Amino acid sequence: MTIDTSTTAPAPDGAILEAWGRRSVASAIYASLPFSDCPNAAYTPEEKAQIDIMDAAENLICAATATTPQGVAIQLWTALAHVEQDREPEAAINIMDLDWFLLDETRFDWNVRLILAALKSLRAIGGAA
């Protein structure tokens, strides 16, 4: 039996979810590339390829209007990725590990804590955070 998917409505926030998946994979790949601590070094072709994927995904996430708590959470995680750019927080962001951030949220600046508060609120109302 085959299912006709041509008339199936897209999943709510499907584009946001798919973009987050692409962004998370590209970010993880980028993080696994050899690290250069030279601030003026140009991106390698490998780095640039992953950055381009992340940029395209983040542009879609930003341009979209979320209609579900999960979509809103992804938008907040994407914002957090632009505030916390060290490797350890970025790894937690990629897997949406709110508990990692909440272990000691006072270690973060106020802007991060405000995003964390919104993610906690989404979790409390039953949204994926």
Image (cartoon, rainbow, N blue to C red):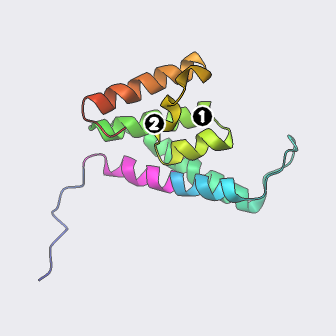
**What kind of element bears circle 2?**
helix
Bounds of the magenta segment? 12-23
Q: What is the tally of numbered marks visible in this picture?
A: 2
**What kind of element bears circle 1?**
helix
Left or right of residue 31: residue 102 = left
Is 13 placed above or below 3 here? Answer: above
Amino acid type of the residue that numbered disc 2 sits on in the rendered structure:
Leu
Front residue of this view, candidates 28 and 11: 28
Quadrant location, the C terminus: top left
Q: CA distance from mark 1 to mark 2?
A: 16 Å
The spot of residue 90 in percent (x, y) is 60, 42
Query: Which residue is located at x 62 percent, y 53 percent?
Result: 52
Q: Is residue 98 magenta?
A: no
What residue is disc 2 on?
Answer: 98
What residue is disc 1 on?
Answer: 82
Mark 1 and mark 2 lie on one chain; the one further toward the N terminus is 1
